[in-house]
Image: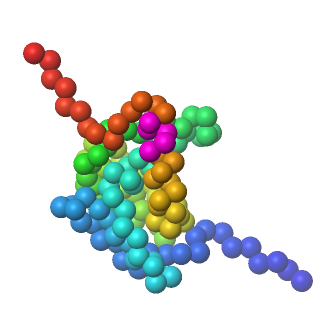
């Protein structure tokens, strides 16, 4: 008797809507669920190696991204999308599995991020500091 092994995601998006004015992305899933992701949330949860590192100890605290926008969402094969942000960060490839998790478990992920921000003495706000 052989065991079936499934690689990849169990859920697939049926629609991805980028709403620039509201600074959000709405993803409908083949499960019938739909999740709304703020662009800030996607930026601070970026799974790229620059943001997350190759080991948990290398994870960077991303801050100051409130109001960040998205310039492009591009399909990557049949398993992910690449998101380019208007802060010139464009190396994030979000697998469908990762996006589904970010939607399904939004409150837990966001609360954990806010705790990390506070512990790091950082803010969600973008600061425009000019010298006189």
The stretch in magenta equals 114-118
The image quarter in which residue 26 lies: bottom left
Between 116 and 62, the residue placed more toward the observer is 116
Could you say which is closer to the camera, residue 83 or residue 130?
A: 130
Q: Is residue 88 visible?
A: no
Quadrant showing the C terminus: top left
* Residue 97 in the figure: left or right of residue 25: right
| Above-or-below relation of 57 to 129 | below
The residue positioned 50% from the left and 54% from the top of the image is 109
Residue 107 is situated, as x and y percent measured from the top left of the image, at 47, 59
Check the image and report above or below for 60 versus 22.
Answer: above
Q: Is residue 21 left or right of residue 52?
A: left
Q: Main secondary structure of the magenta part?
A: helix
The one nearer the camera, 95 or 69, is 69
Residue at 45% over, 79% down: 33
Residue 118: x and y, percent? 44, 36
Q: Total of numbered circles in the picture?
A: 0
Q: Is residue 29 visible?
A: yes
Judge left or right: residue 1 versus residue 47.
right
What residue lies at 42% left-to-right and 30% top-to-bottom?
Answer: 121
């Amino acid at each position: 008797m052989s065991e079936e092994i499934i690689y990849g995601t169990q859920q697939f998006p049926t629609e991805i809507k980028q709403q620039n004015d509201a600074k959000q992305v709405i993803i409908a899933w083949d499960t019938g669920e739909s999740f709304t992701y703020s662009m800030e949330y996607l930026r601070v949860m970026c799974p790229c190696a620059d943001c997350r590192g190759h080991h948990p100890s290398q994870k960077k605290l991303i801050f100051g991204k409130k109001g960040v926008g998205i310039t492009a969402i591009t399909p990557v094969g049949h398993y992910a999308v690449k998101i380019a942000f208007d802060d010139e960060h464009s190396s994030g490839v979000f697998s469908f599995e990762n996006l589904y998790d970010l939607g399904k478990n939004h409150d837990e992920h966001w609360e954990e991020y806010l705790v990390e921000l506070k512990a790091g003495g950082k803010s969600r706000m973008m600061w425009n500091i000019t010298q006189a």
